[in-house]
Amino acid sequence: MCRNIRQLHNFEPPATADEVRAAALQYVRKISGSSKPSHANADAFERAVDAVADASAQLLDALVTTAPSKDRDEEAAKRRARAAQRYAA
């Protein structure tokens, strides 16, 4: 999976539409092999991003959990710590 796509479920506050769309964009970029589509493919690319974002939002709305919500700042700190350890010289 693309490393830039972050988990969006079970956070407080819930994921925003912008976060869902950003994840959808990363997904479509990954599977298309193109970060910026040609002019001829731009419409298909945008439709795909919209479709993936809609499907992702529906999924996030339908998921249920009994686990406590995660804190975004705390999870970001964990990611930074893992990255620092991974890339330490």
Image (spheres, rainbow, N blue to C red):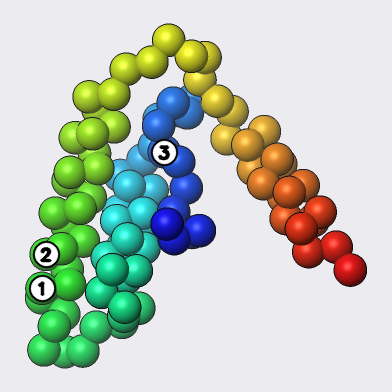
- The residue singled out by tag 2 in the image is 47
Q: Position of residue 32 (x, y in %)?
A: 25, 74
User: Which amino acid type is shown beneath numbered disc 3?
Assistant: Leu
Q: Residue furthest bottom?
A: 39
Please report contact status of discs 1 and 2: CB closer than 8 Å, yes or no.
Answer: yes
- The residue singled out by tag 3 in the image is 8
Count of picture labels: 3
For the point 32% across and 17% down, which residue is it? 64
Please report contact status of discs 1 and 3: CB closer than 8 Å, yes or no.
Answer: no
| Image vertical order of residue 34 relative to residue 80, above or below | below
Q: Position of residue 7 (x, y in %)?
A: 45, 41
User: In the image, is 4 to the left or to the right of 29?
Assistant: right
- The residue singled out by tag 1 in the image is 44
| Image vertical order of residue 82 relative to residue 13, above or below | below
| Image vertical order of residue 56 relative to residue 26, above or below | above
**SS category of the residue bearing label 3:** loop
Label 1 Cα crowd, 10 Å radius (few <14 / some 14-19 / many 20+): few
Q: Earlier in the sequence, mark 1 or mark 3?
A: 3
User: In the image, is 29 to the left or to the right of 41?
Assistant: right
